[in-house]
Amino acid sequence: KWKGEGTTLNLESIVIGRCYDYIRLVNPAVGEKNCSEIWEAFKNAFINKDPCSILPKDYELFISLSLHPIPPNKSLFWENNHLLVNSFADRGRRYMSLADTLFGFLGDFLNWCGQANSTGLDYESCPTTEECENNAVESFWRMASMTYAQHSSGVIHVLLNGSTVGGAYPQPGFFADYEIPNLQKDKISQIVIWVVDDLEGPDIDSCGTHTVKVLENRLNTLGYNVTCTDNYKSVMFLLCLDYPDDSKCTLSSSVCSVDGSPLSDG
Ligand code: ENP
């Protein structure tokens, strides 16, 4: 009856399995967590309720059971480049995006909703945010975003997509509406913005223009020390894995001959 996809099959096994994967292998530094209790708290946020009346605060117990420190200088906020961020952050080894925290990791790529007057999950369909914003998934990410921003410190990184139609900094958006307002200014030394275009995509937005300028102005007005870099090299290298022959992916062209073979230096 809803327009969105239904609950991911085997949701309970996936969430509990991911929880053990996270605390035992991905990030044992978080210490002991009760994965079955975390699942119960997650489920109780939305089961047996009208699927359009789920609020961020319904996930409060889930968040308090799964919360752990976020290392300073490791936070990575983003818009419109989910898979790139997953690779770049490398499950918390390089950066810790929301999906690399325990609470974000449990929900990444999944879908879920319940139904009124039933303790069952709806595997057929779930409401989209267009149908109702107070749905189980949207409220989960709102709560997770607010918590993640409140616990981020040191140098904050933001990876935006300069090829997004409508601009790299979307408003409304999670970063604009739930993350920026929850950053704790006294714990933050700098905000580093990276605007990276898709390799084969258009250059729609860049540092100092359009929506990125709006973002820079907003953060400056809030009193943050802000820097912005276009097509940051480390991220470019990762994109270039899939497009090695793209003109933007040439490594040190000056020391190569026309056929691409290295020139001897003698
Ligand atoms: P999209 O629309 O590019 O990607 C949505 C996909 O990313 C979904 O598979 C979603 O999991 C997963 N995801 C991972 N982290 C988040 C998240 N954090 N979030 C919403 N979805 C997330 O992403 P958005 O909507 O623009 O959100 C980007 C935001 O994530 C940024 O504000 C960034 O700073 C933040 P699922 O369970 O829905 O399938 C917050 C909201 O970290």
Image: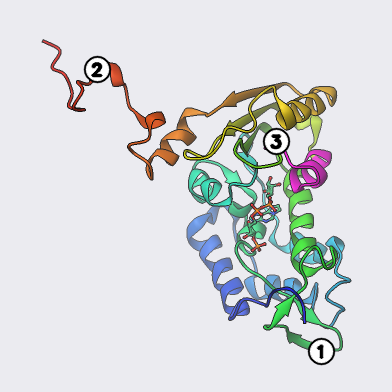
Identity of the amino acid at label 3?
Ser
> For mark 3, does the 10 Å Cα neighbourhood hold few (<14), some (14 to 19), or many (20 or more) residues?
many
- The residue where tag 1 is placed is 118
- The residue where tag 3 is placed is 153
**Nearer-N-terminus badge (2/1):** 1
| For residue 150, side relative to residue 266 (left or right) | right
> For mark 1, does the 10 Å Cα neighbourhood hold few (<14), some (14 to 19), or many (20 or more) residues?
few
Gap between marks 2 and 1 measured at Cα: 68 Å
Residue under the image location 30 percent in, 21 percent down = 253
Residue 173 lies within the magenta run: yes
Q: Nearer the viewer, residue 226 or 239?
A: 239
Q: What label does residue 255 carry, if any?
A: 2
> Which residues make up the magenta segment?
167-182
Identity of the amino acid at label 1?
Ser
Asked whether the residues under the numbered discs 3 and 1 touch, taking CB atoms below 8 Å apart as contact, a structural biologist would say no
Residue under the image location 80 percent in, 31 percent down = 185
Q: Nearer the viewer, residue 160 or 30?
A: 160
Gap between marks 3 and 2 measured at Cα: 41 Å
Quadrant of the rendering where the C terminus is positioned: top left
Q: Residue furthest top?
A: 266
Q: Nearer the viewer, residue 180 or 42?
A: 180
Residue 188 seen by the camera:
no
